[in-house]
Image (spheres, coloured by chain):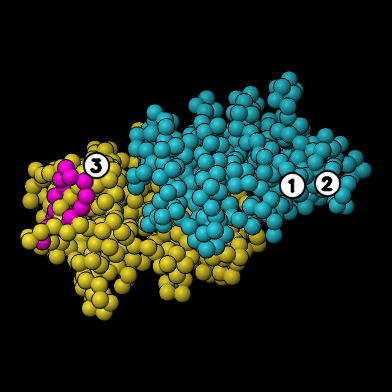
Chain colours: A yellow, B cyan
Amino acid sequence: MATESKGEFELLRRLLPTLGRRADLLIPPGDDMAELSWTAPSLLVATDMLMDGVDFRPGEHTWAQIGRKAMDVNLSDCAAMAVVPVAALCSLALNDELSMDAALQLADAIRARGETFNCPLIGGDTNSWASPTVINVTVLARSDGSEPPIRRDGARPGDRIFLSGPVGGSILGRHIDVQPRVALALDVNRSLHPHAMIDISDGLAIDLYRILDASRCGAVLNDAALAAAIHPDARRLANTDGTTARDHALYDGEDFELIIVCPASVGADATARLGLIEIGVTCAQRGCWIDAGGGRREVERRGWEHFQ
Amino acid sequence: MATESKGEFELLRRLLPTLGRRADLLIPPGDDMAELSWTAPSLLVATDMLMDGVDFRPGEHTWAQIGRKAMDVNLSDCAAMAVVPVAALCSLALNDELSMDAALQLADAIRARGETFNCPLIGGDTNSWASPTVINVTVLARSDGSEPPIRRDGARPGDRIFLSGPVGGSILGRHIDVQPRVALALDVNRSLHPHAMIDISDGLAIDLYRILDASRCGAVLNDAALAAAIHPDARRLANTDGTTARDHALYDGEDFELIIVCPASVGADATARLGLIEIGVTCAQRGCWIDAGGGRREVERRGWEHFQ
């Protein structure tokens, strides 16, 4: 752990008492490592780094929104695997000119968002420097006990493809106001036993291709069904920027909805109760197409390219 | 996970096959989360962020050295707790102008150094941006089964204070060529049952104060004993910069030796076998002093301030 400047020391002094309030934390934050009681037979772990100017823009959003999002993208990874978030760690490289108030807002939002999902911060590393702010969050999770985690490589030809909600146009606001689908994912896992799942961070097209590549199969999306998966924000954007609403749905990022690939036998009752939107089927031939009745066109292998 | 640029994609394509070669890895890197079998009743976790220009300087060291150090500071956290490293994750924000070769050197050094300590990389996040490079490593560890982790808050008045090796002047080379004391720490834990331990990242003085503050006690260091703990590098530096060798030993950072606080009853045979250097005793009065026979002077509460 690096030497704290006076500012960092003050930040840590204010933060540490707000962390580590949980019974299974055997060694709380403040030592060289935190120790957490662990009864599950396995653990899941992921890490995501967000950079000022690439993943967020302080001029456009509050530090509280940015902090919340840094935790949300990790919680969404837990949703993608259908596992239960347990605890998180956060490293900060704070720009020198950030005020103590802004730094506290950021750190407290990360902490508070984790706690909303029973995923408290149990450690971290606080630094400052002259370059733009960097936020790294690592999340620890466990399977829910009754079902294994859902990987992205288990799709088989003939499976049915669903979305947890409509997509596209997240830039109008949902990209910073993320709703990680953790609870839904656990329900989906118990109810539907999906073959594969992923969260849409970079776009429906590119993230579906990730499932298809890992599973060595292809997919045909139904054009009419896809229309039902277009978010009103995608239609609103399409009215102003010349890109079609359908392309916004396919290629915009940061929706953080789930792509859920299920055995063909799943019941309509269950998918309806879960509010899933069916958009197509997997096939043996590698690739991804949209079938609009009159013929197929290929889905492009591209996604969201940050703010750059 | 962010959309990869072509360079990042290429980096991931080359890195992924080198990761995840271990039997207890149930879901290897490449999915939204990695899954690791976990049989210990608890887990320990820490995270450290290194920033270009603050914690390392690419002009002075190779990317392989920098990558190795990014892993070493985390392994040293494991040594500080006397626990066994199990796996690590790494997030990178790579400066745009870094070549693919340099990025591969960096990432491969992180991976290789972890594997030397049976601590393979099982996940990460690769990004690029226009600002200086940031490296974040998170390490997972377990206790060695027979002994609990050693915290920094367990020192009691009358304990004896040891170092795992001489300190000071690490800037002459040892600061980039770190030897994490993981094996020694496990042996120390089994042999001496220490009350408190920490690794010297920011300096003997400031890191000892961290033990004393957490343990709510003080310490008196023996001036003659301290002389035996001064590294030759500290003496070499003292010859050129006007700071005494003793002050280099007290206030230089990045030695990554251990401060080990033991019950008074520990045997001389054991501490000699482990190569420990005794430097003083703890006391009830809060503070830290050096006793040079003729009187006490207070140890300053300051440490290494990076390159800034």
Q: Amino acid at mark 2?
A: Leu
Q: Are marks 2 and 1 on the same chain?
A: yes
Expressed as whole percent of the image width and height from the top left, the position of residue A26 reads 48, 40
* Residue at the disc numbered 2: B237
Q: Is residue B304 left or right of residue A8?
A: right
Which residue occupies 48% across, 50% down?
B91
Q: Amino acid at mark 3?
A: Arg
Q: Which mark is residue A216?
A: 3
**Residue toward you, A148 or B240:** B240
Badge 1 amino acid: Ile
Instruction: Give how far across and how far down residue B42 sits, in percent.
Output: 45, 35
Helix, strand or loop status at disc 2: helix
Marks 2 and 1: CB-CB under 8 Å?
Answer: yes
Q: Residue furthest right?
A: B294
Q: What segment carries the magenta color?
A: A275-292
Does residue B187 sit above or below A168 in this rendering? above
Residue A280 in magenta? yes
Q: Nearer the viewer, mark 2 or mark 3?
A: 3
Q: Tell me whether marks 2 and 3 sit on the same chain.
A: no
Q: Give neighbour class at mark 3: few <14, some 14-19, many 20+ (Cα, 10 Å).
A: some
Examine the rendered structure and indicate whether residue B71 appears above or below residue A175. above
Host chain of mark 3: A
